[in-house]
DNA sequence: AGTCCACAGGAAGGGCAGGCGA
DNA sequence: TCGCCTGCCCTTCCTGTGGACT
């Protein structure tokens, strides 16, 4: 295939004496050229389609569980399970928005609160989650400084002012419980006994199918009154979803049927993740556009896959704190030297040496163990606890950084640490 | 069967910064 | 201003673990 980047074209082919002229010409050309996209936002995670394909059963089940709110009854608490990109969040949001519409026309007083518990600095502590819930009902509270029980009381008082049904959605609830434990959830289960006018229901969304097993029995029985499982999409279903979005996102004929099939197949292999499929398609479109082409072809999807992986890794690494970078630097070095997998003890030894060499303070093995866990949670590495019998119990660490991103990863770490 | 190793990981608490209310 | 509360990062201390070794 012959590729021609418009950037290269303008830089080399024309006699333009100054940089500003060059850039100006590029922008004019860019504006005058027809975009491959018709409406790019249709491919974003936040976009809510009018119709969600292949989720009729789940939507009906969800609607029937929440419907009693329209008759001033408290709907059952609910857990929604399913892997990433199976439509849990989007279906919940759609049903809630329809419920709000129905409430408006029927005169029911329903308030819905949606909180993504995985958002850093939003819901990673009990205080912040309560503050976020208060913000959702337009009550401003300081980022820190107040006792937690004051926030609880304020929240109870505010929501109990009117006779209303409140539905609180805690998305990625497993991340919250991992961070602050399930005591908080227990407090929430007691919420209705504190209220005289309002009624509160909870929807917990998680991609961890065994999440409820890790909960306290009281919390489990109270919050898990109903359960809905979202199964992964298969390749055919993903293809339908992609087709639906392509029709509005791209100009007609901008995505070849082969590219569409390939995109669906890649995402189907990765646990039927529709979000991943849409990302692949969006980035592939951007790549095609950058090359000045009017069609997305299979090859762009390969490039898109690499780019998404690469961006995810390098962006995550850039944001890491210095000590975590030092630990990762040691893991990469150990893996490159020893090949394959390394053990916690070896990593700590290398990490300590690196810190001494670079005049950095070094942390205790206990803390380094936690940092290794954090890298694991970010999927930069994978760890597995193994027993080496008489030679102790340790963690085996494997790098998850693709070879294609290794150079950039090192560049992101090397300014901080030298040999 | 008991011992031992090299950790994993929970619990408790210190120190610091930042904010609130009296 | 001061006491109290929070989050955050960290250390210290401790118990638990599982399979090789004796």
Image (cartoon, coloured by chain):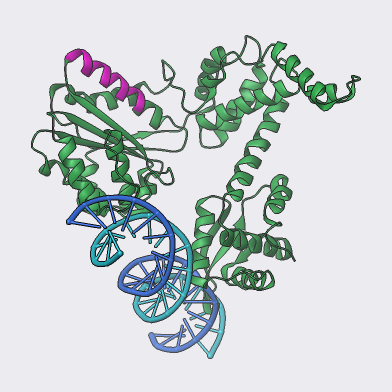
Chain colours: A green, B blue, C cyan
Residue A150: in sight, yes or no? yes
Residue A5: in sight, yes or no? no
Query: Which residue is painted at 51% across and 37% down in the image?
Result: A271
Where is residue A352, by image quadrant? bottom right
Single out the residue that lies furthest toward the left: A196
Query: Which residue is painted at 62% across and 21% down in the image?
Result: A260
Reply above or below: A222 against A356. above
Compared across the picture, whether A333 is left or right of A268 comes to right
**Magenta segment, which residues?**
A93-106
In the rendered image, the quadrant that contains the C terminus of chain A is: bottom right
Query: Which residue is painted at 22% across and 16% down in the image?
Result: A104
Reply above or below: A96 against A361. above
Residue A357: percent from left, percent from top = 69, 72
Where is residue A23, by image quadrant? top right
Residue A167: percent from left, percent from top = 24, 32
Residue A162: percent from left, percent from top = 13, 29
Q: Main secondary structure of the magenta part?
A: helix
Compared across the picture, whether A132 is left or right of A16 comes to left
Residue A271 belongs to the span the image colors magenta: no
Residue A90: percent from left, percent from top = 40, 27
B15, A356: nearer the viewer: B15
Residue A103 belongs to the span the image colors magenta: yes
In the rendered image, the quadrant that contains the N terminus of chain A is: top right
Q: How many discs appear?
A: 0
Single out the residue that lies furthest toward the right: A15
């Amino acid at each position: 295939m012959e590729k021609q980047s418009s950037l290269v074209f303008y830089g080399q082919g024309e006699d333009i004496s100054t940089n500003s002229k060059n850039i100006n010409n590029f922008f004019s050309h860019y504006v005058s050229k027809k975009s491959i996209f018709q409406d790019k936002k249709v491919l974003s995670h936040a976009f809510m389609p009018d119709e969600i394909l292949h989720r009729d059963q789940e939507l009906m089940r969800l609607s029937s569980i929440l419907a009693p709110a329209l008759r001033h009854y408290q709907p059952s608490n609910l857990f929604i399970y399913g892997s990433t990109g199976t439509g849990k969040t989007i279906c919940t949001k759609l049903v809630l928005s329809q419920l709000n519409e129905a409430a408006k026309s029927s005169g029911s007083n329903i308030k819905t609160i949606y909180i993504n518990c995985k958002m850093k600095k939003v819901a990673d502590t009990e205080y912040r989650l309560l503050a976020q819930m208060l913000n959702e009902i337009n009550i401003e509270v300081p980022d820190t400084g107040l006792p937690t029980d004051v926030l609880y009381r304020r929240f109870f008082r505010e929501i109990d002012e009117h006779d209303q049904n409140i539905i609180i959605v805690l998305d990625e609830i497993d991340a919250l419980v991992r961070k602050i434990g399930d005591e908080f959830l227990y407090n929430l289960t007691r919420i209705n006994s504190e209220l005289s006018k309002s009624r509160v229901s909870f929807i917990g969304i998680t991609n961890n199918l065994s999440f409820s097993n890790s909960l306290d029995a009281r919390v489990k029985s109270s919050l898990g009154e109903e359960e809905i499982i979202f199964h992964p999409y298969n390749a055919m279903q993903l293809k339908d979803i992609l087709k639906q979005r392509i029709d509005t996102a791209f100009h007609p004929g901008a995505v070849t049927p082969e590219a569409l099939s390939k995109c669906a197949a890649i995402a189907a292999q990765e646990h039927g993740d529709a979000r991943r499929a849409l990302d692949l398609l969006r980035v592939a479109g951007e790549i095609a556009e950058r090359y000045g082409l009017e069609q997305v072809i299979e090859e762009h999807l390969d490039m898109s896959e690499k780019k998404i992986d690469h961006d995810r890794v390098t962006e995550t690494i850039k944001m890491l704190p210095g000590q975590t970078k030092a630990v990762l630097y040691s893991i990469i070095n150990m893996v490159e030297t020893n090949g394959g997998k390394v053990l916690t003890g070896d990593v700590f030894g290398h990490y300590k040496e690196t810190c001494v060499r670079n005049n950095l303070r070094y942390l205790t093995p206990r803390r380094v163990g936690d940092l290794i866990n954090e890298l694991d949670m970010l999927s930069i590495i994978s760890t597995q606890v193994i027993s080496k019998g008489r030679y102790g119990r340790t963690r085996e660490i494997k790098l998850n950084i693709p070879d294609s991103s290794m150079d950039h990863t090192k560049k992101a770490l090397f300014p901080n640490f030298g040999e």
